[in-house]
Image (cartoon, rainbow, N blue to C red):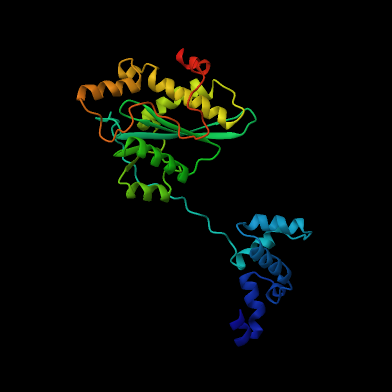
């Protein structure tokens, strides 16, 4: 149209009729002034981080600015303020491995997390570690928050007590796939075996233990504080390892099964440094649990 207006100004009306547009719209010039909205959006982008268009729009409305959301969005895009969506981090391909009983103690461990709440509603978590050879409970770490560094702290203490396993089986929880955990496994030459997502049966040993632990401890008591959870958990570990018959082990406890295998082989398994049940790593816990609390578990 600009070319027609320059070369053949008398044909403007004919061109408008052919294009089916009015001459008034052709000569219309916008009188919109977006400077105020631009200034407000730029101020928000500099002072507020991690918020997108709708948060900016709601902030402007709360400040008393009556602006149509379509106008704000047009200017928002023009200024290039759109937030980039974070792409989901894809997990590397997990290969299904057959669940096998290790040949000896301290060869393969299984680890997992569990969650519950105190009587006041405050959530806590437990980090469970068992040995796949005889399903012996190596430790249960309980606290309100358990990060990757805390997991590695527990594993270091268990390695110092029992020796270094060849591999550790786990799911794809954020504490296990963290960069610090991968670096630690490489530095200690321990193979982290991740199960396939959504396939808890591939970590069946720890899942079966979790069922017993929830039924005998987490669902059986109302806890008022975290120390009560740790005390009952320590009592449960002692009973589970030394007194409770295990069907998969021929009806004998895990600790006795390990001792019988060691006696048959005339030597302790490689890396075994402590033949007794696992003592607690919590310095605040007492070494001797009252007999009346132990009797609660001996009935199972």
Q: Is residue 152 above or below residue 286?
A: below
Residue 233 on image: x %, y %: 49, 26
Q: Position of residue 213 (x, y in %)?
A: 46, 24
Total marks shown come to 0
- Could you tell me which quadrant the N terminus lies in? bottom right
Residue at (59%, 83%) from the top-left corner? Answer: 3
Residue shown at 45% from the left, 35% from the top: 281
The answer to whether 75 appears left or right of 144 in the picture is right
The residue sitting at 53% across, 33% down in the picture is: 284
Q: Nearer the viewer, residue 137 or 65?
A: 137
Q: Toward which corner of the image does residue 197 lie, by quadrant?
A: top left
Residue 158: percent from left, percent from top:
38, 37
The answer to whether residue 90 shows anywhere in this view is no
Q: Residue furthest bottom?
A: 7
Task: Say which of 262 and 110 sits in front.
Answer: 262
Q: In the image as oriented, which residue stretches furthest toward the right?
A: 64
Image quadrant assignment for residue 100: top left
Q: Is there any visible trace of residue 222 in the rendered image?
A: yes
Name the image quarter holding the C terminus.
Answer: top left
Q: Position of residue 107 (x, y in %)?
A: 29, 35
Horizontal side of residue 219 vs 27, given as left or right:
left
Q: Is residue 133 left or right of residue 7?
A: left
């Amino acid at each position: 149209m600009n070319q027609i207006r320059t070369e053949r100004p008398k044909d403007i009306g004919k061109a408008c009729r052919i294009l089916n547009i009015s001459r008034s719209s052709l000569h219309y010039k916008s009188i919109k002034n977006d400077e105020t909205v631009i200034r407000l959006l730029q101020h928000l982008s500099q002072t507020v981080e991690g918020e997108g268009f709708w948060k900016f729009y709601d902030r402007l409305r709360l400040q008393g600015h009556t602006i149509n959301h379509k106008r704000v969005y047009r200017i928002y895009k023009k200024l290039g303020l759109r937030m980039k969506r974070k792409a989901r981090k894809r997990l590397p391909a997990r290969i299904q491995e057959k669940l096998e009983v290790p040949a000896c103690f301290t060869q393969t461990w299984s680890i997992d997390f569990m969650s519950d709440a105190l009587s006041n509603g405050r959530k806590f978590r437990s980090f469970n570690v068992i040995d796949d050879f005889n399903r012996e409970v190596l430790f249960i770490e309980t606290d309100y928050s358990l990060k990757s560094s805390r997991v590695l702290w527990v594993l270091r203490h268990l390695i110092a007590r029992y020796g270094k396993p060849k591999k550790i089986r786990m799911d794809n929880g954020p504490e296990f796939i963290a960069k610090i955990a991968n670096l630690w496994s490489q530095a200690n030459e321990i193979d982290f075996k991740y199960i396939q997502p959504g396939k808890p049966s591939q970590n069946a040993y720890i899942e079966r233990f979790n069922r017993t632990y929830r039924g005998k401890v987490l669902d059986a008591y109302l806890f008022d504080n975290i120390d009560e959870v740790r005390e009952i958990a320590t009592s449960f570990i002692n009973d589970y390892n030394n007194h409770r018959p295990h069907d998969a082990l021929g009806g004998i406890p895990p600790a006795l099964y390990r001792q019988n295998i060691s006696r048959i082989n005339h030597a302790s398994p490689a890396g075994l440094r402590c033949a007794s049940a696992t003592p607690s790593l919590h310095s605040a816990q007492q070494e001797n649990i009252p007999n009346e609390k132990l009797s609660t578990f001996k009935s199972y």
